[in-house]
Image: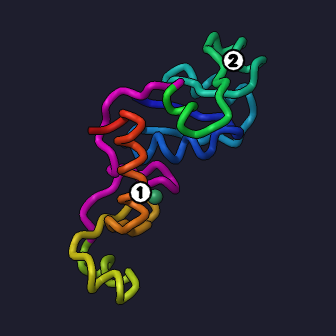
Amino acid sequence: MRYVCDAMLGRLARWLRLLGHDTLYAETGDDELLRLGETRRLLTRDIELARRGGVPVIEADGLQEQLLEVAPPPAKPFTRCTACNGELRAATAVEARKAPPRVREAHSEFRACDACGQLYWPGTHFERIRDSLCEWGLIE
Ligand SMILES: [Zn+2]
């Protein structure tokens, strides 16, 4: 599923990316959001914008509730950059060398964002996120 989130839903956008969904976070005007919403599902907390886009408004305040409201279909978690929405691929040896030494000792698998170069590895942060997503029934 492809999404576009309004400026009030930055956290939700990052978590949809974690789940592997192509998600734009557009800190932009309503007209641009509506234009992007022609080819993506528009997620907004703005009642007026939701009305113009013919979509339901996201009512929940909390992240978990928002995710359950969106009910994203199964995807490939941890395949997308949370910072920029780029796709992750196996990091090259040169890229992996950018990780802190302690991390390099503990991990052998690194992924890098194809778009912005951000480096990722399965650390404790990753485990916590995976646990939350499982608990909320969003991944197995
Ligand atoms: Zn990136």
**Residue placed under numbered mark 2 in the picture:** 50
Instruction: Tell me if 8 is positioned left or right of 71 in this view.
Output: right
Q: Would you say the magenta stretch is mainly helix, strand or loop?
A: loop
* Magenta segment includes 92: no
Q: What type is the residue that disc 1 sits on?
A: Arg
Furthest-bottom residue in this view? 101
Image coords of residue 87 (percent x, y): 36, 51
Instruction: Tell me if 118 is positioned left or right of 14 in this view.
Output: left
The tag earlier along the polypeptide, 2 or 1, is 2
Q: CA distance from mark 2 to mark 1?
A: 32 Å
Label 1: which secondary element: helix
Q: Is residue 48 above or below residue 99?
A: above
Front tag of 2 and 1: 1
The residue positioned 70% from the left and 27% from the top of the image is 45
Q: Is residue 108 above or below residue 82?
A: below
Label 2: which secondary element: helix
The residue positioned 44% from the left and 30% from the top of the image is 2
> Is the C-beta of the residue carrying label 1 under 8 Å from the nearest atom of ligand 1?
no
Of the 4 image quadrants, the one containing the N terminus is top left
Range of residues picked out in magenta: 69-91
Q: What type is the residue that disc 2 sits on?
A: Ala
Q: Which label belongs to residue 128? A: 1
Instruction: Tell me if 135 is positioned left or right of 26 in this view.
Output: left
The residue positioned 78% from the left and 17% from the top of the image is 48
The residue positioned 62% from the left and 44% from the top of the image is 10
Image coords of residue 21 (percent x, y): 40, 38
| Pointer 1 local density, CA inside 10 Å: few below 14, some 14–19, many at least 20 | few
Q: Which label belongs to residue 89? A: none
Q: Is residue 133 above or below residue 95?
A: above
Of the 4 image quadrants, the one containing the C terminus is top left
Image quadrant in which you'd find residue 74: top left
